[in-house]
Structure formats: C-alpha cells, structure tokens
Amino acid sequence: MPFHRFEDLETVRLTPHLSSAESPIIEGKYLYYCLNQKKAGTGSELHYHPNELVIFTLQGKVNAVVGKDRRIISPGTLILIPPNVRHS
C-alpha cells in the first residue's frame, strides 16, 4: 500500500533492548520509517545496523552521537547516519 497515516497505525516499542523509542512503523523492502518518540531524559544505547538511518528532529532536543561526533540537536536538524556506524 503506497499511502499511510501514522495515526492509523499501532504504536510499538522499536527495540526495547536498545532504546526507549515508541512509534508506529511503515515498513518497506529496504527501509522503515517511523515517527519516533522518546520521553525526556531517555534514549538509546550505542548500536549500529546495516542500513542508513535518517533522523529529523521535530521537537525537543536530541543528545546525538554518530561515530565520534556528539552534538545537541534542535528541531529542524536532519541527521544522516551511514550504514554500520555506531550511533545513539
């Protein structure tokens, strides 16, 4: 199905062993897209995966780690994480 609305999808815990993220997920063959939400003060463990990851911050601040780079990200910033690069 090519058309999706997040409010029509069930919210799930993405990777409970790594992250506090909860989101509805739209899955394709090579990627998935989610409206990732985390409670303030929570986050994820450093990890990596074989696919690229794109994060676009809508609200709040993100303490982002990508490889050896660490930044506090504010709304409007896009983070592009290459495949197999540790991030949190």
Image (cartoon, rainbow, N blue to C red):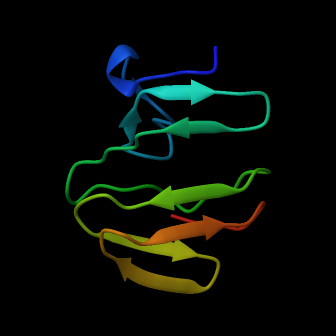
- Looking at the rendered structure, the number of numbered marks drawn on it comes to 0
Q: Is residue 19 above or below residue 57?
A: above
* Left/right of residue 15 with respect to residue 83 in the rendered view: left
Q: Position of residue 53 (x, y in %)?
A: 63, 55
Q: Residue at x 27, y 69 (%)?
A: 61
Which quadrant of the figure contains the N terminus? top right
Q: Residue at x 36, y 56 (%)?
A: 43
Q: Residue at x 24, y 60 (%)?
A: 59
Provide residue 85's location: percent of width, then percent of height. Answer: 72, 67
Q: Which of these two is toward me, 28 or 48?
A: 28
In the rendering, at what x and y percent does residue 10 appear? 38, 16
Res 76 → quadrant = bottom left
Q: Is residue 38 left or right of residue 27?
A: left
Residue farthest to the front?
A: 3
Image height check: is 2 above or below 15? Answer: above
Residue at 49% in and 22% down: 4
Left or right of 66? Residue 64 is: left
